[in-house]
Image (cartoon, rainbow, N blue to C red):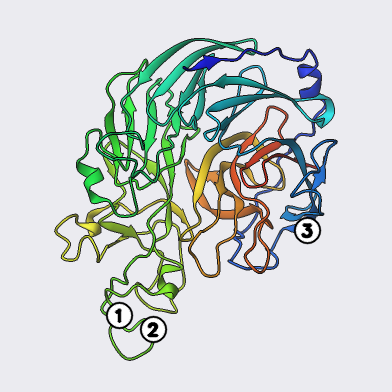
Amino acid sequence: MRTIAHGVMTASLVLALAGCTAMEESPVPERSTVAAPGAAQVPGLVASAVRTLDGTATAPFDAERTVQAPPGWTVTVWARMDKPRLLAWTPDGQLLVSRPKYGDVLALTPGADGAAPAQRTLLTGLNQPHGLAFAGDTLYVAESDQVNTYTYRAGQVSDRTIVIDGLPDDKSPELRGAYSHALKSVAIGKDGSIYVSVGSTGNISAADRDATPQRATILKTPAGGGTPTVFARGVRNGTGLAVDPDGAVWTAVNHRDNIQYPHELDYDGDGGKDNGDVMQSYVNDHPMEQLARLTEGRELGWPYCNSEPDVNPGAPDSPLSYTGRPFVRDLETNVDGTKLDCAALPPVEQGMGAHSAPLGLSFVTGPGLAGGYGEGALVGIHGSWNRKPPRAPEVSFFAWRDGTLGPQQTLITGFQGADGARWGRPVMAVQGPDGALYVSDDQAGAIYRVTASA
């Protein structure tokens, strides 16, 4: 049974938001800075000790933790809970946190002057709730098998309505529990349309493209719900899902693993052609993760085409680029190019290094972030599971300029040691009503509050 747990807001909310430090806009940075795997220091960032509040200093914060962040920024462990995932701010300034593992959504009411928030359970008894979104006073919650709406007023929710149902998850009879990406994300368009991500069942499960409903898609329904249609396909796992300031839908995609080398060249230097081989040195940087602006019918290629980060495709010493990248056929699934014409697909707007595992996506509007960052997109980078050396977790920023997103910039990193061991893994970052950033970390079991000096 799915139930609603009610709570009471604190009367100090308005004072709390008024007393928090805002992030003021500065001149735009001249160039991007991106963390490389194993990098000791990211240009433009400085070491910053992670602060703790009373009651937040249990493991992993029982030892001193240090991150890299822009100069003058402070990272504080603001709240603790197990396995926090995606975030959304309510109209009255509470931070909602989804927890698929526990089937609930928590509400955090900020304390005065950045003090630890009061916590309560807003919703419980759900099927792996993940994506959260608001349209006015309507709260949208994406469970693994459906999307619900609730009326939200004064810290209370009521009037649950199922607006999309029948979504595939690991309980779907035809899948028999074999579903790797059951969690769903949700975003609401400016016209009220509902967008929901449906991940693939596996790494290269091509049958997803012919399933009903299609998997590896972004689905769309009109405002108010109904039977969804395919808005974009070939989206292996578009966990990052958000609407930009102009109303366009963007997705950040977890792409495939263990890709075969698709070129008839000698990549490993042994004198023979390597096409069809799975080589760790190639897998480490291929295929790139996608950050794409979606339009009706957009095709992102999976599992037949992969976004190509090599400036010189197939060359072992090729520079890597993640802006406006074309596609190359997947040798394992599209050997002769008949499944999908990869050269005909529009280039992907932006991307991230292979196996970054982008999760939560949100947009920051004016005045934007301090330190010259301004408006843009925030992406929680969870870090790789199979890259050698592992790609580090971070919070990334993509500047919003002239109606599109610029290249990736590392905003906060340092969650991974030189040996690849991690004490934290960011999931999502959102800007709060106070101008601070709030970041969920499902490994450390924390919500960070990130502020900039005045």
According to the picture, the residue beneath numbered tag 2 turns out to be 268
Could you classify mark 2 by the number of other residues whose Cα lies within 10 Å: few (under 14), some (14-19), or many (20 or more)? some
Give SS at disc 1.
loop
Q: Amino acid at mark 3?
A: Ala
Residues at marks 3 and 1, CA–CA distance in whole angstroms? 42 Å
Describe residue 49's horizontal placement relative to residue 313 as left or right: right
Q: Do the residues under discs 2 and 1 have CB atoms within 8 angstroms?
A: yes
Q: Amino acid at mark 1?
A: Asp
Give SS at disc 2.
loop
The x and y percentages for residue 429 are: 61, 40
According to the picture, the residue beneath numbered tag 3 turns out to be 47
The x and y percentages for residue 30 are: 63, 57
The x and y percentages for residue 359 are: 51, 44
- Above/below status of 73 relative to 438: below
Mark 2 or mark 1: whose residue is earlier in sequence: 2
According to the picture, the residue beneath numbered tag 1 turns out to be 274
**Most distant residue in the bottom direction:** 271
The x and y percentages for residue 345 are: 26, 53
**Residue under the image location 75 percent in, 25 percent down:** 110
Residues at marks 2 and 1, CA–CA distance in whole angstroms? 7 Å
Quadrant position of the C terminus in the picture: top right
Mark 2 or mark 3: whose residue is earlier in sequence: 3
Front label number (2 vs 3): 2
Describe residue 46's horizontal placement relative to residue 404 as left or right: right
**Residue under the image location 45 percent in, 41 percent down:** 239
Q: Amino acid at mark 2?
A: Asp
Front label number (3 vs 1): 1
